[in-house]
Amino acid sequence: MKSLADINLIDKNLVIRVDMNVPMIGKQIKDLSRIKACLPTINFALENGCRILLISHLGRPSEGEPTDEHSLRPICNCLSDILNEKVELVQDISNKEIFTTGSRVKVLENIRFFVGEKSNSLELGKTLGTLGDIYVFDAFGTSHREQASTHSAILQSKECCAGLLLEKEIKSLNKSLNNALSPYLAIIGGAKVSSKLGLINNLNDKADHVIVGGGIANTFLKAAGFEIGKSLFEDSMLEIATEILSKEKILLPSTVVVSQTFEGEQVLIKRVEEVSSTEMILDQRLTNEMKEVIRRSKLILWNGPLGVFENSLFCEGTRDLASKIALSKGFSIAGGGETLSAINTFINKDDVSYCSTGGGAFLEFMEGKKLPSIEALERK
């Protein structure tokens, strides 16, 4: 696929699909990570004298029904502060003067307000793809979505290329997929085995060790014959979990944190064989073997917390994990919203070698799946 460096950008009009789907509390941006991740491509374009229209989504509004709650105006204002120049919000893509008047950088209102985005409309895709001279796709976080701004627009553009963030994501994640470094450790947490089965299977083949956490760990513990009480687990996944365990790469916790409720009634630290039928496992402690594996690993892939870390009563496992990864000398890759939130909560983000902006895209890429946006860029 073409990159920004392959194209003459001087004085061109660029439409850049970014992923600025940031967490919000009311109209306040909670975390700027995804906005900051877009800056290298934006700044590179500005250095080449380009005029820019940024496209992004925010949340999950109903198509064709704009709401103040999902407006990109706060993103616009934030970008204006970061770039130290005016950034305008554009409502109408039929406006012929998008690139000829006003500020150098503009932001199109939430693309999910536009009819045809989610259905990968050819009409909307063509409009977006031909608005400027070049269509730049830099939204790895949405590259698994086959939608008008992430697929049709690429294929129908006059000229297109990958942005700097997308290139960086692919290069870093391929480092893990190609498994050039060993020992290789994968850490997979979260609620459900089923949602990450493809990833677990793929990593169970490639990695030397796999640490599991959260509801996923509970399912494996039950498959291994342990009592897990009222803990979250997936009964339909027990047979598959048993099969995965047979490869002897999964590292299970030996000590867990239990409670009668999610809120933290009667919190106790117990050996896994001591959990009662009335308790639920809400956190786990790293075993000495896990700590040693983290220390020795030359490649670490992390997706998902070990427990309900948002509650301070059940955060110690994830905190300890983050700290051990931060101290590791290996190349560490982290992805997924909860994982990045844990990193921002417990350690310095710079202590992780690479933090992916993708959630679902990260998972699918690491499963070895072809992502629609990347396929479209390669075809074009």
Image: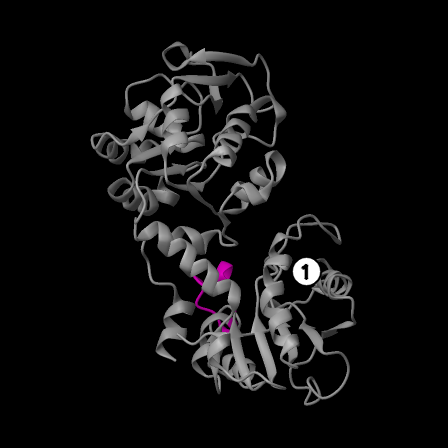
Query: Taking 88 as reference, is 77 above or below it?
Result: above
Q: Is residue 367 visible?
A: no
Secondary element at image label 1: helix
In the displayed structure, does residue 366 sit left or right of residue 120?
left
What residue is at 64 percent from the left and 50 percent from the top? 23
Please tell me whether residue 201 belongs to the stretch shown in magenta.
no
Up-down: is 96 above or below 280?
below
Q: Where is residue 141 in the image (x, y as percent from the top left)?
A: 50, 58
> Picture coordinates of residue 208 (x, y %)?
28, 36
Front residue of 210 and 276? 210
Q: Is residue 7 visible?
A: yes
> What crowding class fits label 1: few (fewer than 14 Cα within 10 Å), some (14-19), or many (20 or more)?
many
Q: Quadrant of the image for the C terminus?
A: bottom left
Observer-nearest of 293 and 194: 293
Let me know if residue 143 is in the magenta part.
yes
Q: Where in the figure is residue 354, as x and y percent of width and height?
A: 49, 49
- In which quadrant of the rendered view does residue 88 lie? bottom right
Q: Which region of the structure is painted magenta?
A: 138-149
Which residue occupies 50% across, 74% down?
148
Specify the farthest residue to the top: 274
Look at the picture and state if 256 lies above or below 143: above
Q: Which colour scheme is used?
A: one colour
Residue 220: x %, y % from top left: 33, 28
**What residue sits 37% from the left and 32% below the top?**
296
* Mark count: 1
The residue that appears at 40% across and 31% down in the rendered structure is 294
Would residue 247 appear left or right of 64 to someone viewing this image?
left
Q: Disc 1 residue type?
A: His
Which quadrant holds the N terminus?
Answer: bottom left
28 over 65 or under it: above or below: above
> Which residue was labeled with disc 1?
70
